[in-house]
Amino acid sequence: MSDRSLRKHLISALQGGDAHNPLDASIRDFPASLAGARVGENPHTPWRLLEHMRIAQWDILEYCWNPDHVSPQFPDGYWPSSDTPPSSRAWKESVDAFCSDLAAMRGLVEDPESDLFTPIRHGEKQTLLHEAMNLAIHNAYHLGQLMFIRRGVATESVV
C-alpha cells in the first residue's frame, strides 16, 4: 500500500462515512436539546460523551505535535463533571472545538511531511499512524453511543 493510499484510508476512518455516519456532520447535527438525556441503561448523557470525545481527541492531537503537552489525569480528566452542559452555549462551543480539532488531525495526517511510521520523538513508541487509528476507533465507538441515545429517545422514556 502506498503512503498516499494509507493516508486516504486514515482520513476516511477519521471523518467517518462509508459504513459509518460522517463524524463531524453527526456531531453538528446532534440536537442540543438532548444534551442531558438518559435513555435506558446507558450510563452517559450526550453531554458527557461529547465532552469526553472532545477532551480525548484534543489530548491525542496535542500529544502528536506538542512535546510539552501534559495529558489530563486519567480517567477523571477525560470526563466532564456534570450530566448537562453548564450553559446553553457550552454544547455549541464543545461541538465547534471537537470539529476544529478533528480537522486539525486530518490535516496532520494528510500532510506528506508528517511521518506516519516513525515513533513520535517525545512519546513511548507511538506513531502518528497509531494515534490516528486510536482516535478514529475511539470516536466511532462513542458516536455509536450518541446515535443509540438519539434513536432511543423516540422509543423509550428519557430520564
Image: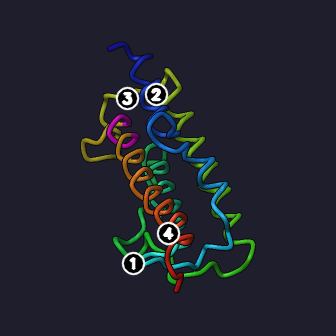
How far, Cα to Cα, is label 1 from label 3? 35 Å
Q: Nearer the viewer, mark 2 or mark 4?
A: 4
**In the displayed structure, does residue 57 sit left or right of residue 116?**
right
Residue occupied by mark 2 = 114
Q: Amino acid at mark 1?
A: Pro
Q: Give percent across and percent down for residue 92.
A: 71, 64
10 Å neighbourhood of mark 4: few (<14), some, or many (≥20)?
A: some
Q: Could you tell whether 30 is left or right of 67 in the image?
A: right
Q: Earlier in the sequence, mark 3 or mark 4?
A: 3
Tag 3 near tag 2, CB within 8 Å? yes
Q: Position of residue 2 (x, y in %)?
A: 36, 13
Q: Which residue is mark 4?
A: 152
- Give the residue displayed 24% in from the left and 41% down from the top: 125
Disc 1: which residue: 43
Q: Amino acid at mark 2?
A: Ser
Q: CA distance from mark 2 to mark 4?
A: 41 Å
Query: Observer-nearest residue: 23 or 2?
Result: 23
Q: Where are the magenta residues, as a range?
A: 128-132
Identify the mark nearer the N-term, 1 or 4. 1
Name which residue type carries label 3. Answer: Leu
Specify the principal SS of the magenta part.
helix
Is 128 in front, or is 8? 8
